[in-house]
Amino acid sequence: MSKRTLTGIQSTGSMHIGNYFGAIKPTIDFSKTNETLLFIADIHSLTTIKDAKTRQDNTDSLLASLIALGFDHDKNILFKQSDVAEVCELAFYLSCFTPFNTLTKAHAFQEKSVNDVNMGLFTYPLLMAADILLYNADLVPVGKDQLQHLEITRTLANKFNTEYGSTFTVPEPYIIPELKTIIGTDGRKMSKSYNNYIDPFENNPNKLKKTINRIVTTSAGINDPKDYESCTVFNLFTLFSDSSEIEDMKIKYQNGISYSEVKTTLFEKIMDEFKQAREDYFKIVEDKTMLKVITLKGKYKAKDIATIKLKEIKTKLGF
């Protein structure tokens, strides 16, 4: 039986391969057999991005990426979070059922110093919960770092259902067991905030190649045997390779392949993997009319669900 899944991706700039393998590719694959709502979390991005043009450009870039990579926005629902204002209203209602102490324990809060936290970031789990519960999502693809926030959502759903009767679908997490943390060029988790990401839609191939060449490696000599298990370049290579290619590369590491050769191979793999998507992306991102039409279509589909759900909630709350 098909289950309704929901995924939100923040509009913090162009897509990188950590986003692609961590959220976008699994969502697109899953959407082929399950009804999927995929939204650009542009309200969430306001916690860090204050400039309106930057946020809009980021949103357009992410939308173009999703379309170019094959997300079926006719079969599913692709929309901007900000196009469905009901989510902010529900977030406030949920805040009235959330102990303050619950939010102080959330990762979004604890990973920052108190001086760096605005109220939007502090209440991030509540807006995330509203995003999920407003659309009766059965499954939410999440990484391990988001599991805690989903548990807050589940707790709130159960609490409300106990108080007011069956209202919210209690969502289940969907975790891809084989998915590893995607490592960035400096050895840490790939992230925009660390500036260690690889953008497959980088307009200048030479710049992309320079980014790959900056990947940190060991001081092993050019012809020395190398440890592939701890090598970031090798780990990224495996994302784009089949089992026979991976085994062949392991042997090359043991025989002393140079890091520069592996980096060149990785560059070629990325260029090949995203060849068609890159071509489509650059056409789509400039077609503002197309992007507007697609998001308007998604807005009306999402609003149809959200309006009915919010009316039910407000009735039960006595509004």
Image: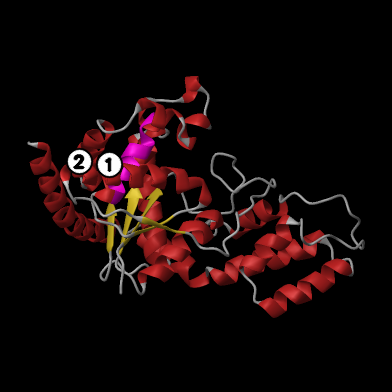
Vertical placement of residue 32 versus 293, above or below: below
Q: Residue at x 34, y 47 (%)?
A: 154
Disc 2 target residue? 163
Q: Residue at x 36, y 26 (%)?
A: 100
Q: Is residue 272 left or right of residue 307?
A: right
Q: Secondary structure at mark 1?
A: helix
Judged by its main secondary structure, the magenta piece is helix
Vertical placement of residue 28 versus 317, above or below: below
Q: Is residue 261 left or right of residue 238?
A: right
User: In the rendered image, is residue 66 in sight?
Assistant: yes
Which residues are drawn in magenta? 122-132
Count of numbered badges drawn on the protein: 2
Q: Is residue 1 magenta?
A: no
Vertical placement of residue 50 versus 162, above or below: above
Q: Quadrant of residue 120?
A: top left
Disc 1 target residue? 159
Q: Secondary structure at mark 2?
A: helix
Q: Residue at x 32, y 44 (%)?
A: 129
**Residue 179, image x, y percentages:** 57, 61
2 and 1 marks in contact (CB < 8 Å): yes
Q: Residue at x 42, y 43 (%)?
A: 149
Residue type marked 2? Glu
Q: Is residue 124 left or right of residue 223?
A: left
Q: Quadrant of residue 63?
A: bottom left
**Label 2 neighbour load within 10 Å: few <14, some 14-19, many 20+:** few
Quarter of the N terminus within the rendering: bottom left
